[in-house]
Image (cartoon, helix red, strand yellow):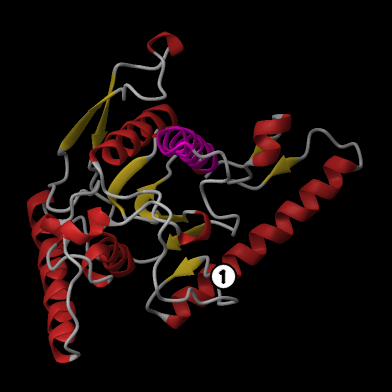
Amino acid sequence: MYKVTRRTAQRQFLLLPTTVTREVFGYCLGLALERFRIRLHAVTVLSNHYHADVTDPYGELPDFKHLLNMLVARAMNAHWGRFENFFASDSPSDVELATPAEVLDRMVYTLTNPVKDRLVRRGTDWQGLTTYGLRFGAKLVFQRPKAFFDDAGGLPEQVVIEVSRPDILPELSDEELFRLLMRKVKAREREVVAAAKHEQKRFLGMRRVLRQRPTDTPRSREPRFNLNPRVASRSKWQRIAALQRDQRWLEAYREAYERFCAGMRDVVFPHGAYLMRVRFGVACQPP
C-alpha cells in the first residue's frame, strides 16, 4: 500500500476544482486504474497537487502513475492553452504504508486535505474530485471528456472508479471500518477548525477558491531540502525493520544486476524488480 502524491509545476493552481478538472482527472484516473489493476482506497485532488492511497498487487505502480500523470498533463495543458511541464520536476512522493494505523492516518490526511489547507471547513464542501464520504465498494462513473480526447482515439466512452477497502483490520466489517475512518476524519476536521478559531484565521471558501487563476500560487513558501520518506510508520522499530528489509532487497538486486551484466542471463532477480523485468524480461523470485 502506498500514498502517491504529485504537485503541479511551480505550485500553480492548474488543477483548480472546476467541472473540467474533475471530469478530466476522474476519467484519467479511472482509465489508469482499470488498465493496471491498481486498487484505490482514497483520493483528493487539490488545486496544485493530488493525494491517492492505493494498493499495487501486481507491481504496476510505475506504469499506473505514468499513464495517469501523462494524460492529466496533456489534457489540462490543452484546456489551459499551455505547453510547458504540467507537473513539478521534483521526485514524486510514494510512501509505503507499513502498518494499519498508518494506512488509516494517511487516508484521513488525504480526505481532510482541503480542510487542513483551510480552504473549506468540511470535506463535503470541497467541489474537486474526492472520495470523501464514499463507502467501500462505491463507484464513480466518468464519461470520456469532449475536450482533448478524440472519439476515434480508441479510449472507452466511460470508466468506473471503485473505492476499494484496504487490506487492514480484518476483524472489522466494511461498514465498521468505514465508520472508524469517518470518525477519525471528523475528529481531524474539528481539530483544524478549532485551531483556526484560536488563531483567528478564516477558511478561504469554495467561492474564492474558484475565483483564483490557474497561474496563481500559494502565498506560503514551500519547504525545500526536507527528507522525502519512503516508509511511514508510527513505530520506530517497524520503520527500522522496513528500511532494513529494503536495504537487503537492494543488496540482492545489485548482486543479480552485476551477474546479469556479466552475461548470466538465467539470473533470478528479487521479487519486486520492475525495470529489468519490463525491459529485459528477467525472472523474479515469487512473493
Q: Position of residue 173 (x, y in %)?
A: 11, 52
Question: What crowding class fits label 1: few (fewer than 14 Cα within 10 Å), some (14-19), or many (20 or more)?
Answer: some
User: For numbered disc 1, what is the local secondary structure?
Assistant: helix
Q: Residue at x 51, y 46 (%)?
A: 86
Residue 177: quadrant of the picture: bottom left
Q: Position of residue 218 (x, y in %)?
A: 39, 68
85 or 39, nearer to the observer: 85
- Identify the residue under disc 1: 243
**Residue flagged by tag 1: what amino acid is it?**
Leu
**Is residue 267 in the magenta section?**
no
Q: Residue at x 10, y 67 (%)?
A: 183
274 lies left or right of 23: right
Q: Residue furthest bottom?
A: 198
272 lies left or right of 148: right
**Total residue callouts:** 1
Q: Residue at x 16, y 80 (%)?
A: 191
225 or 160, nearer to the observer: 225
Q: Assign the magenta stretch its main secondary structure.
A: helix
284 or 83, nearer to the observer: 83
137, above or below 103, in the image = above
Q: Position of residue 61 (x, y in %)?
A: 49, 43
Is residue 172 among the parts visible in the rendering? no
Q: Residue furthest top?
A: 152
Q: Position of residue 122 (x, y in %)?
A: 12, 64
Q: Residue at x 45, y 32 (%)?
A: 78
44 lies left or right of 244: left
Is residue 226 among the parts visible in the rendering? yes
Q: Which residues make up the magenta segment?
A: 62-81
Q: Quadrant of the N terminus?
A: bottom left
